[in-house]
Image (cartoon, helix red, strand yellow):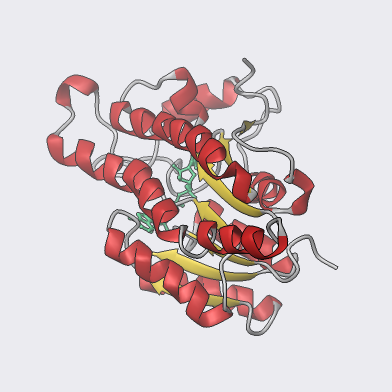
Amino acid sequence: MGLLEDRVAVITGAGRGIGRACALGFVREGAQVVINDVEEAVAAEARAACEELRKGSAAIHVGSVANPADTDALMKTAADTFGKLDILVNNAGITRDRMSHQMTDEWWDLVIDVNLTGTFNCIRSTARYMRDVAKKEIEDHGRPKYHRKIVNFFSTAAIRGNPGQINYTAAKMGNVGITRTIAQEWGRFWINCNAVAPGFTNTRLTAPKQKGDELGVPEEQRQAMLQRIPMGRFGEPEDIANAVLFFSSPMSDFVTGQEINVSGGMQIP
Ligand SMILES: NC(=O)c1ccc[n+]([C@@H]2O[C@H](COP(=O)([O-])OP(=O)(O)OC[C@H]3O[C@@H](n4cnc5c(N)ncnc54)[C@H](O)[C@@H]3O)[C@@H](O)[C@H]2O)c1
């Protein structure tokens, strides 16, 4: 019996990287997942990988978390396809790095819209499927049937501050505020809300950056990061997915409004 048997999860930005690892990990633990991404091809590939693990385990939704109409449609996809929604993983995120004095309005807005407003949009769109359903269960049976879960993403870069990432660090620390607020607003509905801060993890966001690339990290900076990690390696998407699984499973039913760093010790208070 898996940790997420009979649970339905929406994972945003799950076409690649950490989100994809979450989707596969969830399916291995018995969940049915909706894979959201802005890119249809990667979402379809992630779905195929999930279906290979278990037939009928995955659906896709193509759309942006920055658009409230898309996030409404995303949650509806879960309800229409699998009959309900129990877990939301707000993984979708992007970077557009530039020193503060050169940061453009366009890149500021884009990164805030996806990383911060996207989290809010998704949470608000789940209300009728998670909060309202739990409220009805309390009215009918005195308590919710089980704990439902929201997992938000922030970043060790945001905790410390990071030159060149004023937009990203602001958005990610905003997600900590959202996490603490939702934990209090929805705690009585047994909706746990916690946050994961990946450290430096091997995905396209942290791949060696070539001149002109929008994403990635210059090699010199990558090596400097490596020096700061006591465990002497970068994280893998599965390292982060394991923490997300903890916060999504009954193992964390009495944990809410908390943050965890998964960084090989790069971030020690
Ligand atoms: N990789 C790291 O070192 C690291 C460190 C700290 C935090 N994070 C956070 O972890 C999360 C996952 O990052 P990753 O490294 O796997 O990134 P990634 O780029 O590998 O994957 C992110 C996915 O999100 C999708 N996406 C982008 N904008 C979207 C939108 N508007 N709506 C829906 N999907 C969208 C992308 O298409 C992509 O498939 C992000 O929130 C990121 O900020 C990553």
What residue is shown at x 52% (from left), y 81% (from top)? 81
Instruction: Answer above or below: position of 215 versus 77.
Output: above
Residue 194: image quadrant is top right
Who's the residue at 63% across and 32% down the image?
A: 260
Residue 52 in the image: state x and y as whole percent.
66, 80
Q: Does residue 109 appear to the left or right of 148 in the view shown?
A: left
- Say if 133 sits above or below 94 in the image: below
Towards the viewer: 180 or 218: 180
Q: Is residue 179 above or below residue 140?
A: above
Q: Is 157 or 246 nearer to us in this picture?
A: 246
* Residue 71 at x, y percent in the picture: 36, 62
- Judge from the rendering whether residue 116 lies leftward or rightward of residue 228; answer left or right: left
Single out the residue that lies furthest toward the bottom.
55
Residue 193 is drawn in which quadrant? top right
In the picture, which quadrant includes the N terminus?
bottom right
Q: Residue at x 73, y 63 (%)?
A: 4
In percent of width and height, residue 16 lies at 49, 60
**What is the quadrant of the C terminus in the image?**
top right
Q: How many marks?
A: 0
Q: Nearer the viewer, residue 136 or 209?
A: 136
At horizontal 61% and vertical 23% (from top left) the residue drawn is 266
Residue 165 image offset from top left, x and y in percent:
33, 28
| Residue 237 visible at all | no
